[in-house]
């Protein structure tokens, strides 16, 4: 199936607000994950290797973030087509979205990402 569909999604934690999203292709999602991987590897290299990274104290493990493999800025730039905000959709305007809205939109853009109930419900 070729992806070219757009869909309008209500933003649950902002009554009356919506965002129109472009479905991303498999290739776009793969390239996005690859970009994030290379960014993380560059940070590890800058730190001097994996052994130089701070260790997570035992007993403080967190649930994995289903959005971790993705570059959120890239997802949002490629996926947002329109929105109900008075400002036009531009790269600069997208960068000013609050984190809660960014994560909600990212979950909408990534097919199969585990449902983060707090994000989906707008908590």
Image (cartoon, rainbow, N blue to C red):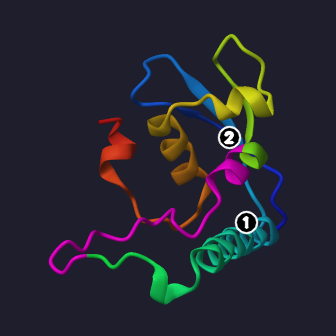
Residue at which label 1 appears: 32
Circle 2 packing at 10 Å, graded few (<14), some (14-19), many (20+), is few
Q: Look at the numbered disc 2 and give the secondary structure of its residue.
A: strand
Q: Classify 61 as above or below 22.
A: below
Q: Earlier in the sequence, mark 1 or mark 2?
A: 2
Residue drawn at 15 percent across, 77 percent down: 59
Q: Nearer the viewer, residue 44 or 98?
A: 44
What residue appears at the point 84 percent right and 65 percent down from the top-left corner?
2
The mark total stands at 2
Question: Does the segment drawn in magenta span residue 26?
Answer: no
Residue pointed to by mark 2: 7
Q: Are marks 1 and 2 in contact (CB under 8 Å)?
A: no
Give coordinates of residue 65: x percent, y percent. Answer: 41, 65
20 up-or-down from 79: above or below: above
On screen, 26 above or below 121?
below
- Note whether 79 is above or below 14 in the view shown: below
> Which segment did they paint magenta?
57-76
Q: Nearer the viewer, mark 1 or mark 2?
A: 1
Q: Is residue 75 magenta?
A: yes
- Which residue appears farthest toward the bottom when viewing the image? 51
């Amino acid at each position: 199936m070729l992806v070219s569909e757009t869909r309008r999604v209500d933003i649950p934690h902002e009554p009356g607000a919506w965002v129109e999203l472009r479905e991303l292709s498999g290739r776009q999602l793969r390239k996005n994950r690859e970009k994030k991987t290379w960014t993380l590897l560059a940070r590890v290299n800058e730190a001097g290797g994996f052994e130089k990274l701070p260790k997570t104290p035992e007993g403080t493990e967190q649930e994995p973030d289903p959005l971790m493999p993705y570059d959120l800025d890239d997802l949002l730039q490629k996926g947002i087509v329109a929105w109900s905000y008075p400002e036009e959709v531009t790269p600069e305007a997208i960068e000013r979205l609050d984190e809660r809205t960014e994560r909600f939109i990212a979950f909408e853009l990534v097919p199969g990402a585990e449902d983060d109930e707090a994000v989906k419900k707008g908590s």
